[in-house]
Structure formats: structure tokens, C-alpha cells
Image (cartoon, helix red, strand yellow):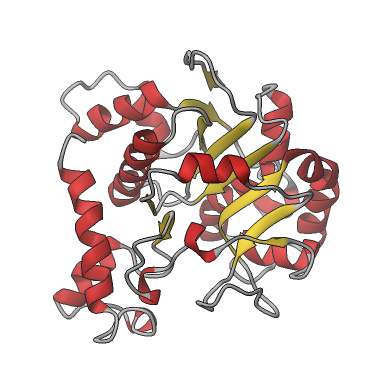
Amino acid sequence: MCITVNYGHKNSNICWFLCYNQNANDIYQEYAHVTMKMINKYISKIKKYLIIDPSSSLSQLFKTNKKSSELLNKTTMMKNNFKIIEHTFSLSKKDSFLKKDKNFQKIGRGAFLRVDIPYIIDKYQLDCRKNYIYTDSDVLVLNKDIEQKLMQLKTEKFMASSESTRTNIKEHNHFNTGVLFANTTYMQKTYKDFLKFIETHDYNFDALDQGAFITFYGYDNHDFLDNSFNWKPYWGINQNANIVHFHGPKPREYYDYINGKLPDVFYVFLNKKTESFYQYYVSIYEKYNNNNI
């Protein structure tokens, strides 16, 4: 199902996609809400789409008439500024997927949604014939000139930033799929083979979709996306960052850290050396979460 909104006149053949992920709980709805607010602030020509798994609670909120729901009020804003596409991951009804345990299915239905973007563009004849950008729903959009910068990017394949290395070079065996800038034609040409590859490998990749991208396309078979488009909070405060990605600890984990409850796995990112960086970015997050901006 695709809920249509009128975009008016657009000058771009680029689309921005978010996929509402597997967790389907209030905190991830909140992250998506903040991300959309920030995209709406700076993006006017690039068309915006939210892909939602129909089983998610956010999808159910779009269908409910409970006017008293605070989250419904938030999602109303989203609905009015994004084109909402309900879509189930293409392999989620395959026996190979259904034999996986329930927790994997819940996570995989969300994580692999971005794989289907080339198919979705074709199915709904979306005007993304040049390029599209995908971002996770836990990002901050910070630069007022980001739309112009995105429209100037060029790639014959796709562009991705580094996983954890701060310097603007390709890492030798990783890239991060939290932000992807892709050539639509190339991704559509490789889509069916990519989908088959994922099923053939029994969905068994490090970091799910990210591992699938790296294994199938190869870590050298992409163009480098400047790290300012996928800046990580633990790298420091960057006044020139275009997109900040809460890779690892999210705002909720920052408060866990403050309260001495942060899971050990996150201390490599969030610790005494980096806590001031997280404080800075979480304060921006809260500004958009708590106010009608």
C-alpha cells in the first residue's frame, strides 16, 4: 500500500528513504519522528518516503483513530510530509526465512527492508530515476545546505562512508550502510542477484543487511561517501557534519550511561572521552523531540 501525498513541483530525480525498523516500540518511533522532523526542515526538493513493515506498531498507528495518542499526533506530521509505503521484505514469506527463529525474523523484516528499495521504486514508479539516499531512522540532519550537496553527488554504483575510521578514506574491509547514496539504475540491475545471494547464504551475515552489502558488492566496489554524511558521535563535535548517525549508542543509551546502566558493549563508543560529544548531539536531538520545530 502506498499513501499518496502531493509534493507539488520538484526539481530533483532523487528520493530519500527511511525504513521503519524491526523494533516497533515507542523509543524507535521517537527516533524516527526526530529524524523526519530534521529532514523536513532542510529538504524541500528531494522526495521523501517512509517504508514501513505492515506488522510494525507504527503502521498500526497510521490506521488507528485514537486521537488522544501522543505518538499518533507525531505520526500525523510524518504522514503529511512523507509518502508512506507499506512493504514487507520480499523474502520474508519464503520457507528459508520462516524457518529462522522468531527473533531473527522480527529483526530481519526491518533490517533487510533497505535491500528492497530498488524494487519499490520500480513497483510504484517513483521518480527516483537518478539516485536515492537511504538513512537509518536514528540520524540527525544538521546542514542547511545538505540538499544542494546531495544533488551534486555522482556515482555509477553506490556511495558509503566508513564504519568506524574517522579519516576520509575507505576502510579495507568495511563500510557502513546507515547512510547510502545509490545510483538507481545500478541497484535495480543488481537487485535480483542480490536477493538471491541473501537467500542462498541463509541470511547469515555480520550485521545482517550491512554484511550482505559488503559480501555481495565487495568493500572495494563502491564510491566513498564523505564521512560528513555519516558522522558518528564518538568521532567528536563536527560543525560541518551533514548527517550524524547514532551508530551504536542511541540517545536512550546516553541516559543509561549517565545513570550508570549502560550495557558493557557500548562503552567502546560512549565513555569519559566521548561523553561530551554525546551530550552535544543528544541535546540537539532533544530540541527536536520536545519542541514543535
Q: In terms of image quadrants, where is residue 247? A: bottom left
On screen, residue 92 versus residue 68, left or right, reads right
Regarding residue 32, the answer to whether it shows in the image is yes
Of residues 284 and 19, the one nearer the viewer is 284
Q: Quadrant of residue 121?
A: top right
Q: Position of residue 232 (x, y in %)?
A: 42, 68
The reply to whether residue 208 is visible in this rendering is no
| Residue 87 % position (x, y) | 59, 33
| Residue 221 found in image quarter | bottom right
Q: Is residue 170 above or below residue 44?
A: below
> Residue 263, image x and y in percent?
31, 79
Residue 30, placed above or below residue 163 = above
Residue closer to the observer: 69 or 238: 238
Q: Is residue 222 left or right of residue 278?
A: right
Q: Residue at x 43, y 44 (%)?
A: 145
Residue at 35 percent of width and 50 percent of height: 28
Spot occupied by residue 54 in the image (x, y as percentages of width and height): 50, 33
Q: Nearer the viewer, residue 113 or 238?
A: 238
| Residue at 29% from the left image edge and 80% from the top image edge | 274
Q: Residue at x 69, y 67 (%)?
A: 204
- 196 relative to 37, above or below: below
Q: Is residue 120 left or right of residue 78?
A: right
Q: Quadrant of the C terminus?
A: top left
